[in-house]
Amino acid sequence: MNIDFILNGLVAGIIATGAMSILQVPMYSKWGMTSVLEWHENQVITSKFIKKNTEELLVPSFLFHFLHGGLGGIAFAIIVSIIDFQVSYLISGTILGFLFALVVLIIHEPITKIKPLKHPLGSIPVVASFVNHAIYGATLGYFLIIL
C-alpha cells in the first residue's frame, strides 16, 4: 500500500469536506444547526467531550467534521487500493458518499435524540444530507485522481 496515496486520501477528504460544508452553510444560516444532520451530530458529540453548551461549540465541532472527512478520505484510499471496483473514483466516491449519508441517518437519533425521518424541518435535512454526501464523495474521488 502506497503511503503517499493514503495521505492524498486524507487531503482529498479534507478538501471534499470543505466543498460539502460550503453547500451546507445556507441551510445552517436559514434553519440552524439541526438542519445539517452531520454538523448537529458533531456538535452534540463535541459537547460531551468538552463539557460545554452546544451553542458554544461551532468551531470545535467543525474540526471534528473535518476530521471525519479526512478519515473518510483515508478509508476510501485504502479501500480502492485493495479492491478494484472497475469504476472511476468519481463513481465509487459518490457511492461512498451515499453510504456515509446512510451512516449519518442511522446514528443521528442515538446522538441527537431527533429522528431524521421525522425531522421537525421535514425531509429537507435528509435529502440535503444525501446530496451533500454525494458531492463529498465525488469531490473526494476527483481530488484523489488529481493529487
Image (cartoon, rainbow, N blue to C red):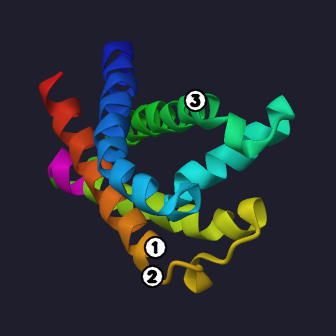
| Residue 139 visible somewhere in the drawing | yes
Q: Position of residue 119 (x, y in %)?
A: 58, 79
Q: Which mark is residue 126?
A: 1
- Answer yes or no: do the residues labelled 2 and 1 have beta carbons within 8 Å? yes
Left or right of 133, for residue 84: left
Q: Secondary structure at mark 2?
A: loop
Q: Position of residue 102 (x, y in %)?
A: 50, 68
Residue corresponding to mark 2: 123
Q: Which mark is residue 59?
A: 3
Q: Secondary structure at mark 1?
A: helix
Confirm whether the magenta stretch covers residue 69. no
Residue at coordinates 54% horizontally, 34% vertically from top-left? 62
- Answer yes or no: do the residues labelled 2 and 3 have beta carbons within 8 Å? no
Left or right of 43, for residue 145: left
Q: Which residues are magenta?
A: 88-92
| Amino acid of disc 3 | Val
25 is higher (above) or lower (below) than 127: above
Q: Position of residue 89 (x, y in %)?
A: 20, 46
- Magenta: main secondary structure equals helix
| Amino acid of disc 1 | Val
- Answer yes or no: do the residues labelled 1 and 3 have beta carbons within 8 Å? no
Q: Secondary structure at mark 3?
A: helix
| Residue 81 visible somewhere in the drawing | no
Left or right of 78, for residue 58: right
Mark 2 surroundings within 10 Å by alpha-carbon count, few (fewer than 14), some (14 through 19), many (20 or more): some
Residue 130 found in image quarter: bottom left
Mark 1 surroundings within 10 Å by alpha-carbon count, few (fewer than 14), some (14 through 19), many (20 or more): many
